[in-house]
Structures are given as structure tokens and as C-alpha cells.
Amino acid sequence: MSDNLLSGTIPNSFYALSNLRILLWGSNKLNGSIPNHICNLNKVSLMDLSHNQFSGIIPHCINNISFGKFGMYDRVYNLSYHVDLEYRPVCTYGNFLVRTYDQFNAYSERAEYNKLVVVEFVTKGRLSSYKGNILDYMSGLDFSCNNLTGEIPREIGDLGSLHAANLSHNRLKGSVPKIFSRLSQIESLDLSYNGLSGEIPLELLNLHFLEAFNVAYNNLSGKTPEMKAQFGTFDRSSYEGNLYLCGHLLENKCSSIGESPKSSSSSEKKDRKWYKIDIADFYPTFIVSYIMFFVAAIAVFYMNFF
């Protein structure tokens, strides 16, 4: 149901779709909060609620959703079924496409049809199409471009089968959860354009499948992760827009490991020598001191001789 003009909130009765595997509601005008009952859709592997007007916090029960854990075992996107020869259904629903292909059997009065599902989903910064067997293994969460607030739920770190997560362009606060280091299958992680603060957890260096990483335009501080393993492939665009973040790829260079960049004013004060005098301050001070000394000398002279 993506790319429409749908408005309003997510219906309370939606939790009844217990076998739903793909939920694409991106680019609509949906609003309100993301309700907790969406966590009852525990078989969903791809969820796109991006480019809407959702507000409030991300439900902490988000780890109840499988995001690919079920699909790895039941292979639901590669099913065959039999129908009568005269039925050849072809259905197209926007980004969700169902095609049928004839596989005639000369010794059968029935035809076998394979159901091929094609899904478009943004991951690694680009729109990609997934179909057939790959959907049994692909999983993703996209809540980008909304008005979500609060902290990033630590529970997202429990989604070990998740391949892509995009929470960018919201108003999220707090730190980047260290538990994200448990997203062992994550390939794309975008937390850019929020209000996140604190340091980038060094534990993220353990994400060996990470191909796209973006924390740009937040309030992060400290040192960027070492340029090794997957983090050796990221460039400046992954970190830019964080005033107090320093590292080899940024204009701000770290003075020592773990330190934030020092302000230019403090650096100038440190470099200033004790014997250097500010001329603009010297002359007024000298004149005032001279006048006071002269007046004091006259007063002493007056008291001694008169």
C-alpha cells in the first residue's frame, strides 16, 4: 500500500493479520503513534513505514517481530500450487507483484504455477528489488522520515536476523545502543539526521557484514571508530555534521584517543606565551597606573611639606 494518499492511524484490528510477512506502508500520510499491537505481526520480515507523519516513540516490543527469523526455515516465497488450466491469474499491486508461470505437464490435466513475489525496499541507500528465494532471507526495518521521538529501543539489538535498519530523519535522542553490536547479520544501518548524542560504540566494530553505515548530522562526540574491518570502507559522509566528533576522516582531529576536538579558543589560549602582551590592553592600563602613581606622589609630598 505504499505511495498512496492514505491518512489516519494504524487500525487497532490490524494485529489479526498474524501470517503477514511483508508490510509496505511507505510514502503515505499516516499519522499518530506506532501502536504496540503492531508487534503482534511477529512473522513480518520486511516493514516499511517511512515517509509518513508518525510521532511518538518506537515500540519497545519491536523485538517480538521476527524480521526474517521465520523465513529462513519455512521458505514461504518459493511455493508451488496447482490450479485448473483455464485460470492464469496475474495481479499487480504497486510495489508488490504476484506473477504466475505455466509449467505444463503433458501427462496431467492440471497446470502448476509458481508464485513469484517481487518487493522493492530501500537498503544501503538505494532502492532494490527482491524476489523469489532471496525473500526467505531478506529482512528490513524502515521508519525513516517521520517525527519519531525518544530513545532508540535497546530491543532492536535483539533482532539478530535483521539485514537493514533505517531510523534516519526523525527526532530521536539519546545514545547509539551498544547492544547494536549483536545485530550480527546487519548490512545497512542508517541513524543519520537525528539528535543522538554520546560516543559511537566501539563494539560496532564487530559487525562484520556491515556495508553501509551513517550517523551523520547528529550531536555525537568523541572519536570515530578505527578504520579497520568494515569500518575501513566508510568515508567522511558517514560521520559529517557532528560538531564534536573527531577522527582521520573529519576536519576535527583528535588530540588523543577518545578525546573530543578542543575548541579553537582554548587552543589559542594554550599556545599564547606568558610574555606576550596584548597591546590593546597595555596602554590603558599603563596610563591609569601612571596617573594613580603621580597623584599618590603629590599627596605624599603635600603631607610632608605642608
Image: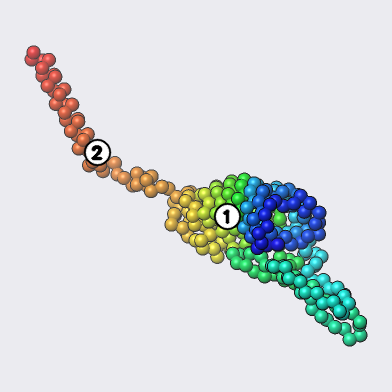
For image coordinates 86% across by 79% down, the residue present is: 86
108 versus 37 height, above or below? below
The residue labelled by disc 2 is: 281
Q: Which residue is painted at 64% across and 46% down in the image? A: 56
The reply, left or right, for residue 60 in relation to residue 168 is right
Task: Give x and y (percent) for residue 224.
Answer: 52, 55
Give me the disc on residue 188. none
Q: Quadrant of residue 82?
A: bottom right
Q: Looking at the picture, how far across and down is residue 255, in whole percent? A: 44, 51
Quadrant of image for the C terminus:
top left
Quadrant showing the N terminus: bottom right
Q: Earlier in the sequence, mark 2 or mark 1?
A: 1
Vertical placement of 204 versus 87: above or below? above
Q: Position of residue 207 (x, y in %)?
A: 63, 59
125 horizontally vs 74: left or right? left
Identify the residue at image location x=19%, y=31%: 288
The three-letter code of the residue at mark 2 reads Asp
Q: Secondary structure at mark 1?
A: loop
Q: Is residue 266 left or right of residue 85?
A: left
Closest to the observer: 52 or 173? 52
Mark 1 residue type: His
Q: Name the residue tied to disc 1.
A: 169
- From this viewpoint, which residue is outermost toward the bottom? 106
Residue 44 shows up from this direction: yes
Tell me the residue at 48%/60% (across/down).
249
List x then y, in percent, for residue 15.
78, 53
